[in-house]
Every structure is written in C-alpha cells, then in structure tokens.
Image (spheres, helix red, strand yellow):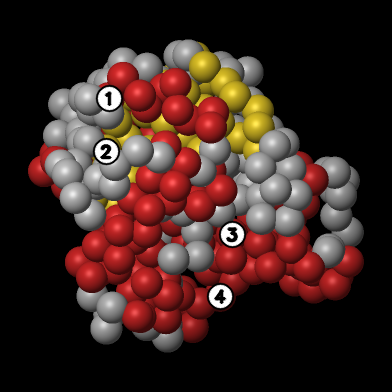
Amino acid sequence: MAGSTAGIVGVHGIGKYNYYLDAGRSATGAAEAMRLKWDRYLHASLGGQARGYFSEVAYFSHLLAEDEGGDDPRRVAAVEASTQRVVAGWAANLGFGEHFTGALRSFTGWLLTRLDRRSAAFAELFAPEVAIYLADQEKRELARRTVAEAIRKNQPKVVIAHSLGSVVAYETLWAHPELEVDLLLTLGSPLGMRNVIFERLLPAPINGRGERPKGVRRWVNIADKDDIAAIPPALASSFTGVDVEELVNLDWIDFHTAEKYLGCPALHPHLRPFLG
C-alpha cells in the first residue's frame, strides 16, 4: 500500500492458525499476510488515500495450536480438561447456570448440541486456544514474548488488540513496563470474563480489580453488544484505568471478527490523532 505506516501494532485474536499454514508454516509470513489484511480493513473504514496503518501484527496463533505440542497423553488430557473448564465457565457467563452436574466432558457435548451455529463454531475456536494459553505457561510466555518483541521493535504509539489478543497484550504490557504506548485499544475483549479469564490474569487482580498497565497512557475498550466473547462488554467495572468504553452494534451474525471491529466508526475519533 502507498504511504508510510501510522505506527500501530496489532495483536490478533482466536482462530488464526490458517494464516500459518497458508504461509508454509511461517510465522513471519502469517504476520505479514494479516498486517496487509488489517490495513485493508481499517482503510475501508477510514477512507482517504490508501496507506499502511499497521507496522506489524504480532502473530502467535501457531504457538497455541494443539498439534504443535506433541502427543504426550498427559499433556493432551490436561488440555482437554482445561478446554472443558473454559467451555463450562464461558457457558455460565452466557447464562446457562453456574453449576453443572455430571462430567465436564458430557456437559460440553450437551452444550454444543444446543447452541446455535454461530455460538457453537465460536466455542470450538475460543475454548481450546484460551485453555492452552492459560494452562501452558511455556506457551503463554512465548506468546507474550512475541507481542513484546513486536512492540519493542516498532515502538508504536497505538496497540490494537482483538479478542484473545487483548489478554496477551494486557499481560505483555504488565510484564514489560518499559514498553510505553499512548493508546491501548481493545476490541471484543474477554478480559473481564469471570471464572474463565479474569481471575487467572497475570498479574492477578487485587480485591477484584485489574488495572491499566503502567506504560499505557490511555485505554479505550470497544465491544459489540452481541459479542459472546466480550462478556461483560464493559471493562471499567473490573479494571481501573479504562478511559473510554464504547458499546457498538456491528453485526448479529458476524459479531466478533477483526474486519467488523476495524471497520467500526467508533474507532475513528480515538485513532485520528495518531494518523497524521
């Protein structure tokens, strides 16, 4: 694309392993393919002359892929159990009740048969990647290191983090307080999801509250009203230092994609000061 980049680093969300495969198992190729696509999504919304907005999209999906960790039966069993706990906790946030009888495995199968197609497809992507990120500390650290390296290398003014990427970005910025950004923009974030993510964050919330990372000057959170990953959609009730919350109406069916979020006009007033 023509023009210089605007100094934005992106952090992607769930379900992006296909970029790695399409790039011949190259994380660098996957990151570049995603950067070009995110540039197009944002340009379609902002209009004007075509330009590069993103310096880089930090790519970590291959690190969380189940087939990348070998076939150790103990590890596979641990991942399956963690995945089932994520599904159960997520379902509780959706209103399926807080207590479940019987084995988690049985409950998980029962739940997926009763969800509508969009929710079932989402759960099958969301639960395994979230479970691996939270349960496998080595992979968790590798994902955070990938994001830290992208921020350190590009020194962006803005970090835009989507979906699970908002969790990785939040933890990365806390783990590396020397990394400073003017704006953290979280899109469709599950950071506040109780009994799934919130209580397991690093650093752990204190007295039921998390806090804006020290190197972040401003935090804006945007969530679609129908986004079943962003539960609750507002983060200010759980985190100190969220400067702006925007509840938007993107698309009832296509409710969680980066394309819809990057194309949302609610981003414009927050990004314009950084676009030159």
Residue at image mark 2? 8
Q: Quadrant of the N terminus?
A: bottom left
- Where is residue 9? Give x, y as percent: 27, 42
User: Residue farthest to the left?
Assistant: 153
Of pointers 3 and 4, the one earlier in the residue sequence: 4
In the displayed structure, would residue 207 be above or below residue 125?
above
Of pointers 1 and 3, the one earlier in the residue sequence: 3
Q: Nearer the viewer, residue 80 or 116?
A: 116
Looking at the image, do the residues carrying marks 1 and 3 touch, with CB atoms under 8 Å apart? no
Taking the image as shown, residue 125 lies to the left or right of residue 32, namely right
Residue at image mark 1? 274
Looking at the image, do the residues carrying marks 3 and 2 touch, with CB atoms under 8 Å apart? no
Taking the image as shown, residue 231 lies to the left or right of residue 20, namely right
Taking the image as shown, residue 231 lies to the left or right of residue 146, namely right
Looking at the image, do the residues carrying marks 2 and 1 touch, with CB atoms under 8 Å apart? yes
In the displayed structure, would residue 130 be above or below residue 70?
above
Q: Of the residues shown, which amino acid type is indicated by label 1?
A: Phe
SS of the residue under disc 3: helix
Q: Of the residues shown, which amino acid type is indicated by label 4?
A: Ala
Alpha carbons under labels 3 and 4: distance apart: 18 Å
> What residue do we see at 88% from left, 66% from top?
114
